[in-house]
Image: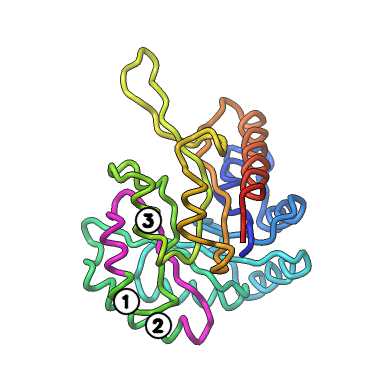
Amino acid sequence: MSLGLGTYALFWEWSDRAPDPIDLPGMLHRTRDLDADVFQICDYPALETYGDARLRDLRATAEDLGVELELGTRGTDPDHLRRYLRRCDRLGAHVLRSMVQVGPGKPGTDRVVSTLRDLRGDLDALEVDLALETYEQLPSATLVDIVERAEHPRIGIALDPANCVAALEHPDDVIDRCAPYTLDLHVKDFAFSRQAGWVGFSYAGAPMGEGLLDYAHELAAVRPVERGINQIVEHWLVWQGDPQTTIAEERRWTERTLTYARERIQP
């Protein structure tokens, strides 16, 4: 098991709101500076422009720093997933996070299961785990059903219980349901706060340990150390009014989350 960062932990710092956005090599160096061992490149549009040479250079940087790479995208289109599996191969990544997208024009669950079964040989050949993330548009029970029907140990779940609250799923229920199938674990806290005038609530990220995530329960259910499951720090930090304040707060949240997790990880 390794503890590390993902692009969602530096979301504002690489966004177009940052006066000097951090690039991927910079993110890898930041990961190493924080004594973290893995970095997940997830939902990072610029990666689509990377050719093989640039991917190999990024891999070399990660290897020089001793940082393991993971990759993330969205969807279950077979051609798209195979493109990302090739990128995993170029990067030396052994985890690919994706999402089962739903809605008009998206494949139904039977089609998704068929696609995943067809990918089993590719996953074995490249030694890549495909971790499908929990989120509010897909009930976690449906995601578990898809994974069970895919029938392969390299097809599982990227567990992030915060994502399912908007669908009125209790985080602990999501953890308990998905833990046996989890191949990747996102670590972020979350909370509700009253809107001005006490009219409704906002749901957003919280500093680790101050929100609703029962991290102890998550660790007990998933057993990431025992099972060799990486933990990836992410945030839902709302904009703080200006880039300097927002990025400084994002960095504080990252350091806090790493410290919090390290204090509680037990074999």
Residue 188 higher or lower than 210, as above or below = below
Q: Which of marks 3 and 1 is nearer the N terminus?
A: 1
Q: Residue at 53% of width from left, 56% of height from top?
A: 44
State which quarter of the image contains the N terminus: bottom right
Inter-mark Cα distance, 2 to 1: 9 Å
Q: Which residue corresponds to mark 2?
A: 120
| Residue at image location 64% in from the left, 28% down from the top | 245
Q: How crowded is mark 3: few (under 14 residues within 10 Å), some or many (20 or more)?
A: some
Q: Position of residue 36 (x, y in %)?
A: 70, 56
Give 72 or 175, whichever is nearer the viewer.
175
User: Which residues make up the magenta segment?
Assistant: 123-146
* Amino acid at the residue labelled 3: Asp
Which of the 4 image quarters holds residue 13?
A: top right
Alpha-carbon neighbours of circle 1 within 10 Å: few (<14), some, or many (≥20)?
Answer: many
Residue under label 3: 176
Residue 103 in picture, x, y percent from top left = 23, 56
